[in-house]
Amino acid sequence: MAASLPPTGIPPDILKEVIDQVRNTRTSRTCELAFVSLYLYDYVTTLDQEANRTDVVQADVLHEDPVLSHIFLSQPCQCLDLSEHESNDSDFIVPETEENPADVQRCDHWFKFQSGEAIVTLGIMQAILVTRIWAIYNSTPLLITLNIFGGLQLAASSIIMGISITGGIATSQPGRGFFVCDITTPPYFAAYWIPILMFEFTLFLLIVIKGFQKFHRSRVFSVSGMSGQGLLNIMVRDSVIYFFIIAAIYAATAAVWFWTDPSLYQSLSVVGIMVPPMVASKMLFSLRQSFYEETTKSALGHELRFASPPSSSWSQHTRQTRSLHEERGQREEWGGAQPETSV
């Protein structure tokens, strides 16, 4: 028996289990740290844009929840050094540590809170997207329809998430001697992303239809008393880019949730929580900046119109008047200097 044990004295199956758990947890924590750092960097670099021109809807709500949840509520992990425990040739006993019910309960609350936070963040972003669709189409019935569809989509995703989390088993010790929050979920847990992708695809189709119509007929909308054609172009462009980025992230997250170990869920879930708010806030800033620049140009053009030199017709009239006066002066000069006559 001793000959079959590795140098650490730990059976290979138990050693592999612990190593896998440590590796997966480290991967998830590294991804969380990387994207939290990216999120904070994006927040700091765009803080001036949020502080200026506060008459437009702020994106602060998109910059709050994920940071709080991933920085202040991340669970630490600890690992026991199993190589310190002795084993003999006939028996190997990994020291079992009973799970503290309070720790398990905290893990269960943590997963439920994180799931609820993801739903709330998703609902805020989709409300912004629906508002953009309403601004593009200028249709109140469409807005009501999308709100109903979005509510049903959020309800379906919430039900799938709730059943999966409630039916799962939270644990604070997924591996022997390894302490970290983990949970087992059914395979259909990945179906959480299906209603979300369907709703995002519906919004994408509406944007594509409006963009297709824009290239076939010139229709100008009135936005705040100014021509909205430029703003319409920006909204169509940003919404298409947003869909491809978000669809790729959501599809990849669904694949990870379906095929990988639950300990790796956080490695890509953090991307689905952090990246969409960043992209959505960029969409808001882009539209606001374009509106501000166009308004500034309009005001500047109005000032220059009154300070500009006279028009060509006015200049021509001035030249004709000046020429007439010069001609008259020459005739008067010639008339006053008549040649002398001989006597």
Image (tube, helix red, strand yellow):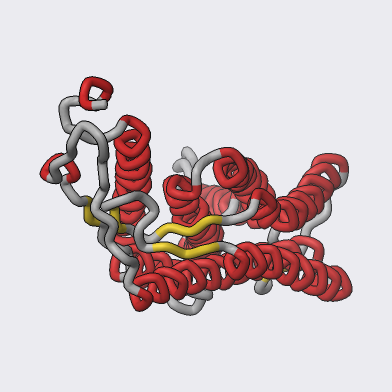
| Outermost residue, left side | 84
Residue at 43% over, 58% down: 182
Residue 291, image quadrant: bottom right
Q: Is residue 209 left or right of residue 150?
A: right
Residue at 35% over, 58% down: 173
Residue at 53% over, 56% down: 184
Q: Compared to 240, does 98 lie above or below?
A: below
Q: Compared to 87, does 105 lie above or below?
A: below
Q: Position of residue 63 (x, y in %)?
A: 41, 67
Q: Nearer the viewer, residue 173 or 191?
A: 173
Q: Nearer the viewer, residue 319 or 119?
A: 119
Q: Is residue 159 left or right of residue 175?
A: right
Q: Compared to 31, does 317 lie above or below?
A: below
Q: Nearer the viewer, residue 106 or 37?
A: 106
Residue 280, image quadrant: bottom right
Residue 130 in view of the camera: no
Q: Position of residue 268 (x, y in %)?
A: 47, 46
Residue at 37% over, 39% down: 17
Number of marks in the rendered image: 0
Residue 19 in view of the camera: yes
Q: Nearer the viewer, residue 59 or 10?
A: 10
Q: Position of residue 44 (x, y in %)?
A: 29, 61
Q: Is residue 194 left or right of residue 49?
A: right
| Outermost residue, front side | 90
